[in-house]
Image (cartoon, rainbow, N blue to C red):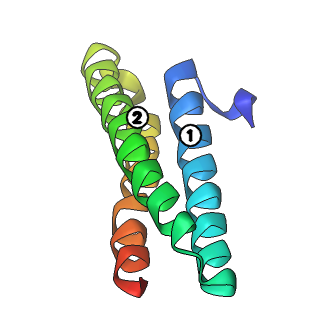
Amino acid sequence: MKTKFTHSINYIAVLTAIISFILGTVLLLLFKTTGDSYFVRIGYLYTILATFTNTILLLLIVINSIRYYKDCTEHISTMLIVIVNIPITIFYLNLL
């Protein structure tokens, strides 16, 4: 997958978005199957950490897309992949 990206920051951002989605889904499923409120606390802390990390990566991608505007399609697709996690997170939080 790394060879599909010209800029390593885009690869890192997509990988982080995928890992964020998987970990968030696992935490939600663990809470729903066990009913233990411990997973809710971990989930909220994880949401704060993932929001902070993904926001920084999104800002770096925006800066990178300004610097390397010729690769704007790669940057825009990476931004969309990162931004897709926002409605998923809101949906997961509403399920609690």
Q: Residue drawn 51% across and 56% down?
A: 42
Give residue 69's position: percent from left, percent from top: 31, 23
Q: Residue drawn 65% across and 59% down?
A: 22
Q: Are marks 2 and 1 in contact (CB under 8 Å)?
A: yes
The crowd level at tag 1 (other Cα within 10 Å; few <14, some 14-19, many 20+) is some
Give residue 76's position: percent from left, percent from top: 37, 43
User: 62 and 67: which one is in front?
Assistant: 62
- Rendered image quadrant of residue 72: top left
- Rendered image quadrant of residue 36: bottom right
Give the residue furthest to the top: 67
Kindly identify the amino acid type of the residue bearing the numbered disc 2.
Answer: Thr
Give residue 61's position: percent from left, percent from top: 36, 28
Kindly identify the amino acid type of the residue bearing the numbered disc 1.
Answer: Thr
Q: Which residue is mark 2?
A: 53
Q: Residue drawn 34% across and 83% down?
A: 94
SS state under label 1: helix
- Rendered image quadrant of residue 86: bottom left
CA–CA distance in space, label 2 to label 1: 8 Å
Q: Nearer the viewer, mark 2 or mark 1?
A: 2
Q: Is residue 7 visible?
A: no
Residue 60, compared with residue 21, is above or below; it is: above
Which disc, if any, is residue 16?
1
